[in-house]
Amino acid sequence: MFKKILIANRGEIACRVMATARRLGIECVAVYSQADAEALHVRLADEAVEIGPPPSAQSYLVADRILEAARDTGAEAIHPGYGFLAENAEFARAVEAAGLAFIGPGPEAIAIMGDKIESKKLAHEAGVPIIPGCMDVIEDAGEAVKIARDIGYPVMIKASAGGGGKGIRIARNDREARDGFRSATSEAKSAFGDERLFIEKLIEEPRHIEIQVLADAHGNVVHLGERECSVQRRHQKIIEEAPSPFIDARIRKNMGAQAVALAKAVGYRSAGTVECVMDAERNFYFLEMNTRLQVEHPVTEAVTGLDLVEQMLRIAAGEKLAFTQKEVKLEGWAIEARVYAEDPFRNFLPSIGRLIDYLAPEPGDGLRVDSGVYEGAEISMFYDPLIAKVIASGATREEAIARMRAALDEFYIRGVSHNISFLAALLAHPRFVKGDITTNFVAEEYEQGFHPADVPHDDPHLVAAMAAFLHQRVAEREASISGQIPGHEMAVSRDWVVVLGEAKYAAAVEPQSWGYDVVVEGKTYALRSDWRPGERMFRCHVDGRALCVQVDRPGMGYRLFHGGGQADALVLTPRSAELNALMPVKEPPDLSKFLLSPMPGLLVSIAVEVDQEVRAGEELAVVEAMKMENILRADCDGRVVALHAKPGASLVVDQKILEFA
């Protein structure tokens, strides 16, 4: 086994690889860009080497600097993680040429299977079903339109070297085909340095199913069952699970056998994933093979009991697989949710900045958290906005879902926006609970975007009761201050009015052992907790049921977070509530005449000029953030009267780009 390895990656996956390497007694070398000098993976490593400026094209994608770092530190092998150079055949070739072990498949397998076009041709030759389409590289937008017409709309325009939802566009007509070709080309070139595209038929009501394979250098190949990855937004996976609620043992065996055959055909070694799309009739088609560790690999680890990083290390060190296909057992259920720095209530726009507060749920008892951040860390505009992955497991799917929902309540993140409200809504959605999901699930259920009203709300009377509990504790502490004038000590009321938006609830608090009974509009809640003012988590039992509620204090009120929902509560005496009702409400300013940047990012281009008339739906500007290009369009007709930013400018959220008459 290796004594020292270099991890050619950053963030969560670098920390994940280090955890296994440390357990095996292997020293770890981290590489980092200038933006990541204080990153968690740098802090955890035995050694760390700076490799360049923040942009990944000048640091994490520069193979020569990574190889130089490996030579200088005496590393024997390189683990690429996922993304960056993980599926770059030339990098794997250079690693081997430098006399180092590449902890992954051989360069030939990467070159063939990492190329979506070539891999589909190979799969077709091997008898694996593939999606109808054009496997030749598309030269220009005109050819894209012609091919799309021949195949028949709708189609998918996809980057040959793509991954992670980058370089993919759906086109349902000629205009979308032209626009999709242009934006997918630009995005693929920026993300992968490879602008080749191909087109295939869009399968309606599809499920995204993938098979995990392991292969050693001695010809042994096994599969570890499937993962369901159909819950996606803009082709980016959000929630994954193993096994799939749509797959039975017969289909699993068939898909697994084909995945193993494909891996053998290409002489594969290491961990790899064969991705398929499955229609409503359970017909499956080969999509691609990811020649690396997947983001969602922990769900497979949870149901098999295997450490995939350990297996990759052992295979790269020349060891044989220590088990056969018959010895692979799937037990229980596991679900992974990806916590991103993005604002679900603003069309999932990326959020960057410092994690002012960061508390993750405690791992253990069927719960695992993989993260590459810490309290005080920076979420950079240069890299993927993943904050953490939460993996919940249980004997059944229902148990895993319940454990995941409870874990999300304990994620306390402040300083950046995050998608926990969205994750909570998905996990509680009836379609997800039934397992009735396709890759269109999010688009169908949230066609008009995601809004606060989409978050499943608890009983508002219970929210009022909890707010009254918190305020009673605060008031009692304030009343205990020393130095009060005798005869004029502060008296604490037990009758309150809780204001939640437009609603008001009368609440009466009765002290009990370890808490209070709170009567709200005639309904009694037995609240028990040792919560003290200033604590961020209100862990309590309500009528014997355990709950965790996050507590913030914006001004005089209380902001409560639970189940993905947020409630702003103001707790007042009855007389104060009467006076509060007379307070005027400040109207927000009118910003409808401005095009504002919906996210922090780089202004790539502006498509209009001053005095130009524009129509609703017309492109106005392109903003790049988190490696994704976002086209901003006019939502009504108008005339441009001023440009407030120039291409190349770094924008903050809500910064003015242009102004209309």
Image (cartoon, helix red, strand yellow):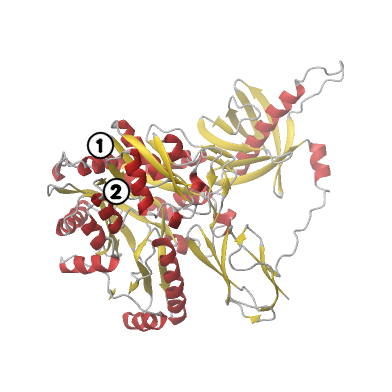
- Which residue is at a point 16% across and 66% down the rendered structure image? 127
Q: Position of residue 648 (x, y in %)?
A: 58, 65
Q: Secondary structure under badge 2?
A: loop
For residue 483, above or below residue 244: above
Instruction: Please tell me whether mark 2 or mark 1 is closer to you in this view.
Output: 1
Question: In this rendering, does residue 81 appear at all?
Answer: no
Q: Secondary structure under badge 1?
A: loop
Q: Which residue is mark 2?
A: 243
- CA distance for labels 2 and 1: 33 Å
Question: In this rendering, does residue 514 appear at all?
Answer: yes
Q: How many marks?
A: 2
For residue 201, above or below residue 80: below
For residue 358, above or below residue 624: above
Q: Residues within 10 Å of mark 2 (few under 14, many from 20)?
A: many
The quarter of the displayed image where residue 275 is located: bottom left
Q: Which residue is mark 1?
A: 2
